[in-house]
Image (cartoon, grey):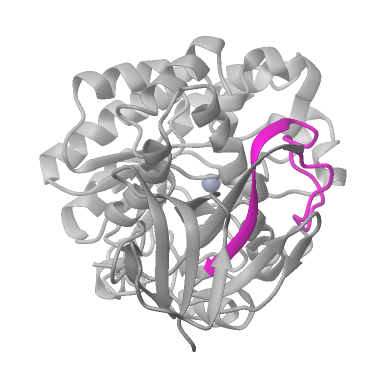
Amino acid sequence: MKPFRIVNARIVTSQGIIEGDILVEPPFIIEVGRVSKQTATVFDVEGRYVLPGAIDLHVHFRQPGLEYKATIETESKAALRGGVTSFIDMPNTIPETTSYTAWRDKMNIAQELSWINYAFYPGVTPDNIDELPEWAHHPNIPAVKAFLARSTGNLLINLEEFEHLLEIIDVPVAVHSELESIVRNNSLKLKNEYFPEIHMYVRPPEACYQATQSVISLARKYHKHVHILHLSTKEEVDLLIKDKPETVSIETCPQYLFFDSSDYYHWGNWIKCNPSIKRTQDREALQKALNSVIDTIGTDHAPHLVSEKIRPYWKAPSGIPSIEGLIPLMTTFVENGNISWHRLVQLISTNPAKIYKINARGDISEGMYADLVVLEQQTWKMCSSYHKCGWNPYLYRELPYKVVQVFVNGTLSYVDEGQPRWIVRNPMPLRFR
Ligand SMILES: [Zn+2]
């Protein structure tokens, strides 16, 4: 592919902003800043921000087995609208990704269908723990995923099994840190009740806090890298401020930053997700922690059909789709002064790349893959959804920036000049370690 330049850019790296140009020889970035080499193709972005593509370490694209909710093709296309150029998908599909064969099948599907770079977590079950270390060190596997509480699907291990896993595994472990025993007891206690914020009582702060306490101490005991997913409480933030081992990394998700328990009255099951959205003090503590203990934003993009979400509380599935809004949503926190531009880049791109040692992605500098997102300052609203399920809870919310161009591996893949258009597909499997 021919080299090209992106000129007149405000280039946001993990360190700050550089005004200048980017020389790309696909798939790589060759030069950043003052570029003297001429190229036939030039993209003049007229002072717009250019960010490294977001790397979303936490998505549920539902394929195989749940294609009626979403597919790798539909969701990876929607992801481009949110400035996401790489995803790592969770194992709770059908079949579950608990064997090498099931993992390999997903890689093959993504190679055929994905619009962005991809990888897949194997899931941990009581039955596969002892054989996982034999194949989980594959260079295309980022980490294994452990559920300490049941969510969509049946993947579940207890704390003793989690400890055993840490003893024997030499790849990172991503963990849903919430205690199943507490969730089960509350579900039994409340099973004949309904009130708007019930989900926060079925899955209360202490279920997360107690699990996270144990997870942190086990990560320290075995010196193993544990990536704690979807942090949702102030208590966990406070714990981590006091005591965050070097081997622990932390994710939160847009829904815990934008919603709190006061929203259940209006939103009901639309914002039912696991762990639950909690109190105002949790949302505020998490927003503040974007500048401290939180390392990354994963969407936990978890699509369900409208017809499933309008069921009564006890029958409605948990999960919120959001990937098509990721970068525009997060620029809200830049616009209101909560985080800087370069902190945004660290949260969505640089840190995710560091967490799993993703090869040559996560920043804008020489030698990196040219996964680039052009952002236009523009007050706008998502008035329709490109997720297969057709909705997200951020529709009609005012957003300060819009994704207008996305390059994946140096290929222009997406353009929005008023209407999203998908141009050319050029994804690669992610490589780790
Ligand atoms: Zn999830």
Q: Residue at x 68, y 12 (%)?
A: 262
Farthest residue in the bottom direction? Answer: 1
Res 405 seen here? yes
Q: Position of residue 112 (x, y in %)?
A: 61, 83
Q: Residue at x 39, y 42 (%)?
A: 347
Q: Is residue 267 above or below residue 302?
A: above
Residue 220 found in image quarter? top left
Q: Residue at x 17, y 34 (%)?
A: 245
Image quadrant containing the C terminus: bottom left
Q: Is residue 55 above or below residue 264?
A: below
Q: Is residue 179 left or right of residue 132?
A: right
Q: Position of residue 26 (x, y in %)?
A: 44, 80
Q: Nearer the viewer, residue 374 or 384?
A: 374
Label tally: 0
Q: Is residue 238 left or right of residue 372?
A: left
Q: Is residue 430 above or below residue 305?
A: below
Q: Position of residue 348 (x, y in %)?
A: 44, 46
Q: Is residue 321 magenta?
A: no
Q: Residue at x 62, y 78 (%)?
A: 425
Q: Which residues are magenta?
A: 381-407
Residue 236 found in image quarter? top left
Q: Is residue 384 magenta?
A: yes
Q: Position of residue 90 (x, y in %)?
A: 51, 57
Q: Nearer the viewer, residue 258 or 308?
A: 258
Q: Is residue 87 above or below residue 314?
A: below
Res 88 seen here? no
